[in-house]
Image (cartoon, helix red, strand yellow):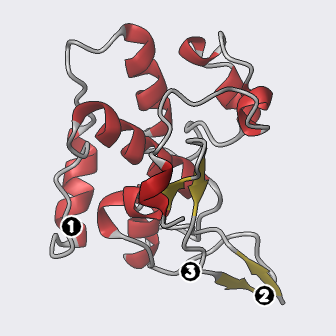
Amino acid sequence: MEYRNDEKDIKPDNILLDEIGHFHITDFNIATVLEDSPLATSMSGTKPYIAPEIFDCAMELCVGYSYAVDWWSLGVVAYEMLRGTRPFDIHSNTSIQDVRILFQMGLECPRSWSEQMVDLISKLLCVSPGLRVSNLVELKQIKCLQRYDVDAVIQRLYRPPFQPPVRSLGK
């Protein structure tokens, strides 16, 4: 039996900043027990940030899902940070059938966003998990991110543009 943390429940509430301004993902209490399969099948997470394939599994329309679900959630958070609203009007009481309809209607990005930003968000919020950006190699190939050294970002070598006031961190 293998325990794997596929569903990290990535959402704004679970992203914290350290004293320098680097982000940290928290709340890893949702774990999936995988017996002999590399795919998870449970319906868990926070509904507005859940990837389409998780809803499909809940309706028994797919055999399982993998790490691509976390990249979807990251896309929802990125969209929400840029626009101030989530890309799909999904709430805790939205039915799975209505969620699937919203996904079929497609993603709408503001016209004010650059072509490169739309490209990034569209690749993170691709309904098909096989076509979605789902690893660092693919992420590095997205045009708007090519000017950054992604490895340096991961190693926290860049100075974040925002540093929270230390007095608000409880020190």
Q: Earlier in the sequence, mark 1 or mark 3?
A: 3
Provide the secondary structure element on which disc 2 rests.
loop
Q: Nearer the viewer, mark 1 or mark 3?
A: 3
Quarter of the image where the N terminus is located: bottom right
For disc 3, the marked residue is: 30
Q: Residue 156, image x and y in percent?
A: 73, 36
Residue drawn at (49%, 56%), measured in percent from left and top?
15
Q: Residues within 10 Å of mark 2 (few under 14, many from 20)?
A: few
Tell me whether the residue at label 3 lies in contact with that at label 2, contact meaning CB atoms closer than 8 angstroms. no
Residue drawn at (64%, 82%), measured in percent from left and top?
32
Q: Residue 147, image x and y in percent?
A: 65, 9
- Residue type pointed to by label 1: Gln
Residue 85 higher or lower than 150, as above or below: below
Tell me whether the residue at label 2 lies in contact with that at label 1, contact meaning CB atoms closer than 8 angstroms. no
Specify the quadrant of the image occupied by residue 143: top right
Cα distance between the residues tagged 1 and 3: 24 Å
Q: In the figure, is residue 124 to the left or right of 2?
A: left
For disc 2, the marked residue is: 35
Q: Residue 63, image x and y in percent?
A: 58, 71
- Residue type pointed to by label 3: Ile
Q: Earlier in the sequence, mark 3 or mark 2?
A: 3
For disc 1, the marked residue is: 97
Cα distance between the residues tagged 2 and 1: 29 Å
Residue 19 higher or lower than 96, as above or below: above
Residue 10 appears in the figure: no
Provide the secondary structure element on which disc 1 rests.
helix
Specify the quadrant of the image occupied by residue 95: bottom left
